[in-house]
Amino acid sequence: MINSMAVIEDGAEISDNVFIDAYTIIRKNVSIGRNTRIEAFCELGSGNSDKLIIPDNSIIRSHSVFYGGSCFGEGLETGHRVTIRENTKAGINLRVGTQSDIQGDCIIGNYNRFHSNVHISKHTLIGSFVWLFPFVVTTNDPHPPSDFLQGVVIKDYVAISTMSVILPGVTIAKNSIVGAHSKVTRDTEEGYLYSGNPAKKTCAAERIRLKDGSRRPAYPWTQHFHTGYPEEITQLWKQG
Amino acid sequence: MINSMAVIEDGAEISDNVFIDAYTIIRKNVSIGRNTRIEAFCELGSGNSDKLIIPDNSIIRSHSVFYGGSCFGEGLETGHRVTIRENTKAGINLRVGTQSDIQGDCIIGNYNRFHSNVHISKHTLIGSFVWLFPFVVTTNDPHPPSDFLQGVVIKDYVAISTMSVILPGVTIAKNSIVGAHSKVTRDTEEGYLYSGNPAKKTCAAERIRLKDGSRRPAYPWTQHFHTGYPEEITQLWKQG
Amino acid sequence: MINSMAVIEDGAEISDNVFIDAYTIIRKNVSIGRNTRIEAFCELGSGNSDKLIIPDNSIIRSHSVFYGGSCFGEGLETGHRVTIRENTKAGINLRVGTQSDIQGDCIIGNYNRFHSNVHISKHTLIGSFVWLFPFVVTTNDPHPPSDFLQGVVIKDYVAISTMSVILPGVTIAKNSIVGAHSKVTRDTEEGYLYSGNPAKKTCAAERIRLKDGSRRPAYPWTQHFHTGYPEEITQLWKQG
């Protein structure tokens, strides 16, 4: 159902079973997949005339802005007031929280979860099953302002806690954990916790215990946290 | 006065002397009290069909989103682009600044002031007369991601300065002060200033002097700051 | 071209060659210069009835809110969801990124660039050719909450990196650089880099080398970075 007060420009492609709420603007360069819901006050396809692909089975919450020239795998879900700029390529089931901003020119894998107010700079590369908590920032200019940019790389299964900044050119290794309010200035080692300003290697992540009384290791988190992932994936995680 | 370009769903309850501006959407599960002003581009009652109570004598500024299932005491005031999610229970005269986000499942007392970009996680408990400055974040997961959450508790008269993060399960005691850009990892002691990353006990708050030339103690702030509170309360503060 | 679904109040002054998109509200106290583009879902002139001057050759991106009582030199450019409050006086070619918030009662020079989520407190004074990166915050209350406010002063050519906070009353001297995730508690010295929490003087900024292989000094940045400035200015910079 397309609300009568939505603006759908000629040329926009809308698949079956799409809901578009009042006061949302869909530009002519947008293609919206099936079973997708676009809430009110959004503008999709702004800034340029390149194709924007909103995939099947997605939810774009209110007041969000997507530029032309990006594509996503199915099951995209956003919070409110999200901004996604041009040339963002993301895999399936990306979740982007309220007021997060993906600056474009970046590649993002599958099943990633970005909480609210996450800021992804241009030239960031993100693997799969990554968690970025509120106000996490990736950067790209080692001596701002300049024309020489070095993106951040974040590997699979990484979790970066709230209000942490990753400096330009840093690689966060697989299964690394970054504590809250940290500034990461160097590459991390796989499976370790880093914390502080500047962040230091604190301990092996597997040494952190769940506080739920079980005393099981909290990391890798795939051993205990499965909410929101398909069963074929969590079965593999359970098998180790 | 309800603008002709606002959308008011059947079932919504609008009291006397309510102003609703253009392009705002009021869902059927919303009840709006008297003498209340809802600015443009808001959506009230989204996300679910539970009752949303917007109280008397309130101002909701533009582009704000309130989910169903929350209630507030009278005199609610928000900035622009505020997000309030389900199951937020707040007392009278809450002020929430521009782009702040209350994630729901939380209890908030009376006369609280949250500046802009404040992020309140689920399971946060906040007393009364609390000040949270821009980009203050409360958290709830001691080993993210996990299913075991521990909320933050913030007691009466606390002031937390800009860009500070409170870690999961921490209690900020009555009259404690947190300096700017701090990470609070442990419970605080009543009436002390904490600052740094990680935050350390710096001094008794009452030892901080006002810089206005008077040399009076800056804390407890109720001894000198009264703007925006009713006289029956500030009279009590003056009496000590 | 003014979209038929924009709201233009009687009294608003719209110059030649102005584009106003759907669902934007222009209050009666607004004057819009020539060759200017206002995107969708904005509200200009809110909060009071003082004059708001939107200058020639400007772009205001979607979901932005400008209060009455501010003025800007020509070539103003904003991102999405910007908030500019009353009594903001800014020079030419100000760029303000997505979700940035200028709280008003401040004076801002020429050719400044504020990235996204920058928060400028009341009583901030900013020179010209200043760079503020995402989530930079200026403050004004040395013992919050209080009635005694001390603004921050930021001089010409300063660059402040992401997630840094400048404490009340601090002056950031000309050509100073502030590293990411820093808390600046004292005045800085001209041409030095400050970094950390609290920020310490790290080195002369001119000792930082460009990582582009040239080994040229990265600062003053005017020696190598010219994108977006008019040639008559960059010619002067090249001459030193």
Image (spheres, coloured by chain):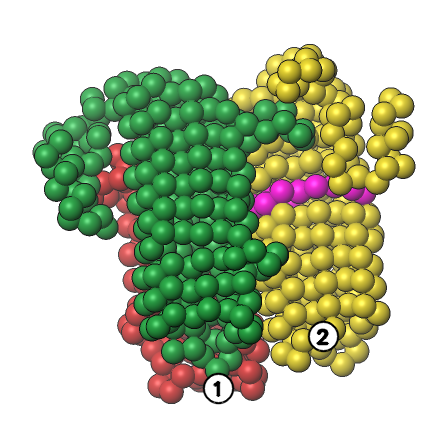
Chain colours: A yellow, B green, C red
Left or right, A48 with respect to C163, comes to right
Foreground mark, 1 or 2? 2
- For the stretch drawn in magenta, the main secondary structure is loop
- Circle 1: is it few (<14), some (14-19), or many (20+) Cα within 10 Å? few
Q: Is residue B230 magenta?
A: no
Q: Is residue B102 left or right of residue A221?
A: left
B98 and B95: which one is in front? Answer: B95
Magenta stretch, residue numbers: A110-120
Q: Residue at x 52, y 74 (%)?
A: B8
The circle drawn on residue C16 is 1
Where is residue B1 drawn, in percent x and y?
Answer: 38, 78
The N terminus of chain C is located in which quarter? bottom right
Which percent across, then down, holds residue C32? Answer: 42, 78
Q: Is residue B102 above or below residue C176?
A: below
Would residue A65 be seen by someone viewing this image from the given angle? Answer: yes
Q: Which mark is residue A133?
A: none
Q: Is residue B99 above or below residue C144?
A: below
Q: Is residue A112 magenta?
A: yes
Q: Nearer the viewer, residue C236 or B30?
A: B30
In this orientation, does residue C177 appear?
no
Q: Chain of mark 1?
A: C
